[in-house]
Image (cartoon, rainbow, N blue to C red):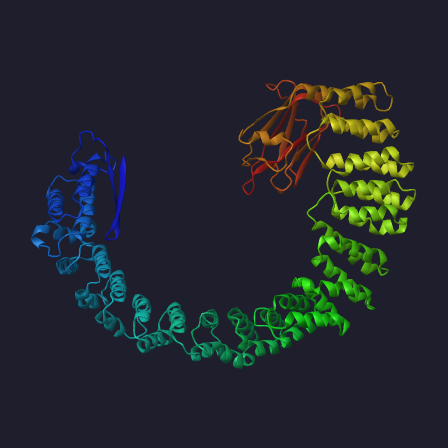
Amino acid sequence: MLRLTFFTAGFIFTLIAHASVAAEPTLSRLDYSGSPMAVEALDRELYAAGTDPAKLAAVEQRLLTGLRANDTTYAARQVLCQRLGWVLGLAPEKLNVADLKPLPVMLADERDSDLARLALEPAPGAVIDTLFLKALHQTTARTRIALIDSIARRQIVAAVPALAKLLTDNDPATAAAAARALGFITDYSAAAVLLAVPEPSPAAVAAAKLALAPRLASGSALAVLADLRGRAADPVHRIAALRVLLQLDPSIATTLEVLEGNDTAAKQVALESIYASRAPQIIPALAAKLSTWDAFTQAAVIAAMARRGDAAATSAVLKATAHEDAKVRMTALEALGFLPGTIETMTTLTKIAAGNASAESKTAKASLARLNGPALNAAILSGAERGETILRIVFIEQIALRGLNEGLPLLLKLRTDSDVTVRAAAVSALGELAPPADNKIVLDWAISATDANEQARALRALVNIMLRNPDVVGRGATLYAAMETAPAELALRLLPALGRIGGAPSAASAGKLALSADLKLSEAATAALVRWSDDTAITVLVSVAERTILPTVRASAVTGVIAAFERNRALWNADATALIARLLAINSSAESRLALITLLKRAADAPALALVEKLKNDAEVGAAAGESSAVIRANQAGPAKLRASTMVDIKNLMDGNTGNRWTVPVEGDEWVEIDFILSRPLHRITLDQTGRGAEFPEKYEVYITDDVALPGKIVASGVGQTNKTVIDLPVGTRGRYVIIKNVASRKDTPWSICEIFVD
């Protein structure tokens, strides 16, 4: 099948040509739901005619003949008129009206006028224009309005007198259409008719004048717009006239006049125009008048001038930084960052940045970092090296904020500065700029610092530098080596850096410190591992628990492992079982042993089953071991099978990945069914929708059964909870199937489950 699309005379038609066509139905009997084959045959004929005048004339006559037939359906007439529009658009320049029958009659007919316009509107020439004019005088209401629109698109200048009369027609829609057409026709006669209507004029006339104004000579355009702005009946047209006036008027007078006034809407238009204004001296003029206006206007003008980035605004904006109104001051401070930078601007911003007004100080620092101009960087480096301390600190911060790598030697030199606040600022800046190769220098700085603030900043800088090192494994090696040989007091001070760097190497380093003979350091290092941000600390904590001689450290390490496994609900593996076995071998606390045995309920490996089987006769934990054994056996029977009221994405419910989810609308009859294959003990169900906030079940009911056809009584019920819905089951609950139902509706959010955890 070949599909060809033609774009011509303001509309599109598509030709579909088949390699072979069955018997073609008669086009005259076409309806909107019938076969398109007759239309396709006609389009093939049009395609074959191309631009050949003789062939087009033949097609034209065929189309007109079809229109003249009494039995041609409306759908067929529409097809014929659409194709006629294309043909007449390519027709010879001289058309004979007599040959166009019945189009002239159709054009004035209420039912057929739209069809005739399809055919005639694309056709060029005065002959067709005459048909539209004649029909205009013969029609009323909607048909006449449609003809007026066609006259406007065809730019029929001869219609101007008729349209002028229709401006005062009793039908408002007709009068409005005439006004629009006069504004659309690009001829002085049409413009003269519109301009002769005094203001206040009807809304359609005012709108047409607005459309006309940009096409007039400059002086005439400004006069029309000024008249509309001052006397139009509708405030919308007055504001629109002002907007166009400001676009066309290259002077500043109107802008200044509006800004001095009290018309808020007009003032907003004037403010919007400043950025694109063609007035050559607009910024000097605004700057000269700035201080005479109210605070709102001053702030808005300052912001507008900043967008232009004209240096002529700088002096006035600098002055505004001392304005009594806080909004004006803040706007001026922000604007200075977008204007060409000078030493005076830099000095002003620096002083404000060093001040006590926190909001203004922050804005000044941000603008100072954006400030661009000759000699500014050199002045910042000079100011950081010497001068008043409070200003030096601002300049030092700017070295980092502006990314001045040429300032690195100075920052390193400031390590020996006599002012501790300067040293602290310098090492903070180093943390933002220094390459990983400088980490040893910053580490030495952190070690030698005696001031607490300087120590903290140096340590933070060291972490930042190390984290920029792409060698993840080796990035902290310098720190690890120093801490292993450092006195306990120093190691304790450096310890927080390990957690911020994170990862297995840092965890291993913390593990060594946890085995220190110094109780304070050992406990602090263990506590750091317990708080570790990822699971790399779990193995280290197990090792600490095994090797430490300090009972408090051992207890803390075991508790940390249990907590880490609770946080990390990843799918269980044999390595996790081995870690639990190591802890059970060294632990005598019944509470900890019970918690560890409970964790094994997530396992399905043989070593886990063997481990709990050995403990079934233990007086303290035997019962818990028996339950864990039953659960492990159920786990070994295979992964739980899932069904739900909506099966889409059901695999997401228990895939060990909280990054995806199962989601359903909350309509009151949603459910999830978990089949553990074997009956097992059940204590708690957690529906994790972390990251989905309030997408919990509106009201849940839980059923536990060994026969899914007989769910029995409700064993737990309640309302959902944000992030995680935790459902505690009655003691002794046991079953193969868990069925969770939502039984209430909610319109605002769905019910989502990222992961189901069953303990």
In the rendered view, does 298 fall on the left or right side of 520? left
Q: In the rendered view, would you say 309 is above or below 6?
A: below
| Residue visible at 74% across and 68% down in the picture | 393
Residue 39 located left or right of residue 714: left
* Quadrant occupied by the C terminus: top right
Residue 355 visible in the snapshot: no
- Vertical relation: 250 (above or below) 491: below
Which residue is located at x 50 percent, y 77 percent? 283
Expressed as whole percent of the image width and height from the top left, the position of residue 405 reads 68, 62
Query: Between 498 and 147, which is closer to the camera in this rendering?
Result: 498
The picture places residue 598, in percent across and down from the top left corner, at 77, 27
- Of residues 621 and 247, the one drawn nearer to the viewer in this rendering: 247
Residue 635, by quadrant, is top right
Q: Point out residue 578 in the picture as x, y percentages from the top left corner.
A: 78, 27
Q: Quadrant of residue 538?
A: top right
How far from the left and from the top, in percent, is residue 4?
26, 42
In the drawing, does residue 479 fall left or right of residue 311? Answer: right
Picture quarter with the N terminus:
top left
Picture quadrant of residue 172: bottom left
Q: Is residue 525 visible?
A: yes
Q: Is residue 164 left or right of residue 428?
A: left
Identity of the residue drawn at 16% across and 44% down: 49
